[in-house]
Amino acid sequence: MAHTIKQRDKLLTRVRKIRGQTEGLEKLLAKDGECSRILQQIAAIRGAINGLMGEVLEGHIREHLGAHDITAAERDADVEQVVSVLRSYLK
């Protein structure tokens, strides 16, 4: 995926922030943190994951599905791939 290579540093920064958030959640759970703080941390992680997914998905759609130099068969295959990923993600 060319678009992920172009945005590698930005995406890796997001992943590292998510890792930090999950480590924070683990610490809260390990020390019996308040439920409200745990829920807040889970919501923050979910938002960060959704943001990462949205960014990668947008890049994929723009670079692959929006490309002018691909065949209809290639475009159909890409559409099926995106639909499959979205179905899995939205479960």
Image (cartoon, rainbow, N blue to C red):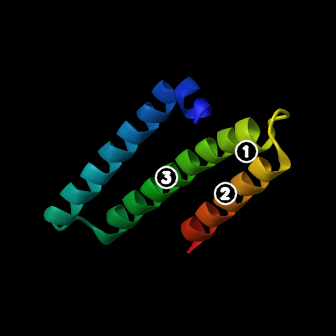
Amino acid at pointer 3? Ile
User: Sequence-wise, which precedes: disc 3 or disc 1?
Assistant: 3
User: Sequence-wise, which precedes: disc 2 or disc 1?
Assistant: 1
Q: Is residue 73 above or below residue 83?
A: above
Q: Secondary structure at mark 3?
A: helix
Residue behind mark 1: 61
Residue at the image position 49 percent from the left and 34 percent from the top: 11
Cα–Cα span, label 3 and label 1: 18 Å
Residue 7 image offset from top left, x and y in percent = 55, 27
Identify the image quadrant of residue 35: bottom left
Residue at the image position 54 percent from the left and 46 percent from the top: 52
Label annotation for residue 49: 3
Q: Quadrant of the N terminus?
A: top right
Amino acid at pointer 2? Val
Q: Is residue 28 above or below residue 5?
A: below
Residue behind mark 2: 82
Could you tell whether 48 is left or right of 25 in the image?
right
Q: Are marks 2 and 1 in contact (CB under 8 Å)?
A: yes
Q: Count how many numbered circles sit on residues in the image.
A: 3
Residue at the image position 25 percent from the left and 50 percent from the top: 23
Q: Nearer the viewer, residue 61 or 46?
A: 61
